[in-house]
Image (cartoon, rainbow, N blue to C red):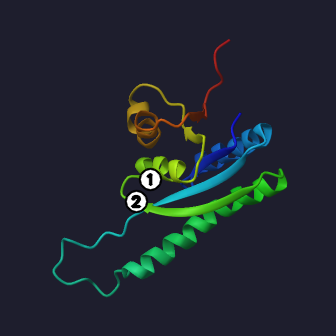
């Protein structure tokens, strides 16, 4: 049914659990996986006239974010290898993680975006899930939202 699944991660515990579910889903579907970490774009300090010496250069920042992205993506790639799921990982830079997720999925021919949600309701839903909600509302690619529930569902 699906040939290539985009699995997102931000390095959090929630996204790691979602990614594990995504890898299992890809295995069940016989699909390959593209694992994506989106890092924020470099921000120049606009509040000072002179950049402080301790402030990283754009090159230093990008290198640090590439390393962080690799650290977040590698365990998911390892899980893919253990389950015989063909996979590749990448780090992308963007001001909007949601729009970058959509762009990467489209450019790489993904036919499903596998993304997480904390499973909150009420005000918590408004505070969290803005990336997931934005992906859902801006893409034409099917999205599977993996919810992590803190409490069991009622019978």
Is 82 placed left or right of 21 in the picture? Answer: right
Residue at x 37%, y 78% (from the top left corner)? 58
- Extreme-top residue of the structure: 155
Residue at x 66%, y 46% (from the top left corner)? 4
Is 119 placed left or right of 122 in the picture? Answer: right
Is 84 placed left or right of 121 in the picture? Answer: right
Q: Is residue 12 above or below residue 60?
A: above
Using the image as rendered, state which of residue 9 and residue 128 is in the foreground: 9
Judging by the rendered image, the residue that carries numbered circle 2 is 94
Quadrant where the C terminus lies? top right
What is the x, y in percent for residue 129? 45, 38
Q: Is residue 66 above or below residue 13?
A: below
What is the x, y in percent for residue 124? 43, 33
**Crowd rating for badge 2 (residues with CA inside 10 Å; few <14, some 14–19, many 20+):** some
**How far apart are the alpha carbons under marks 2 and 1?**
6 Å
Judging by the rendered image, the residue that carries numbered circle 1 is 100
Disc 1 secondary structure class: helix
């Amino acid at each position: 049914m699906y040939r290539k699944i985009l699995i997102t991660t931000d390095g959090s515990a929630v996204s790691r659990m979602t990614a594990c579910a995504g890898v299992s889903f890809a295995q069940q579907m016989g699909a390959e996986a593209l694992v994506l970490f989106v890092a924020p774009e470099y921000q120049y300090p606009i509040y000072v006239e002179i950049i402080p010496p301790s402030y990283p250069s754009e090159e230093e920042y990008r290198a640090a974010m590439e390393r962080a992205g690799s650290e977040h993506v590698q365990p998911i790639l390892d899980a893919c290898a253990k389950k015989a799921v063909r996979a590749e990982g990448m780090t992308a830079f963007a001001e909007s993680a949601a729009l970058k997720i959509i762009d990467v999925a489209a450019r790489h021919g993904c036919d499903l975006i596998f993304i997480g949600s904390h499973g909150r309701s009420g005000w918590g839903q408004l505070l969290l899930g803005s990336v997931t909600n934005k992906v859902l509302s801006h893409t034409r690619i099917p999205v599977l939202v993996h919810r992590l529930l803190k409490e069991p569902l009622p019978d």
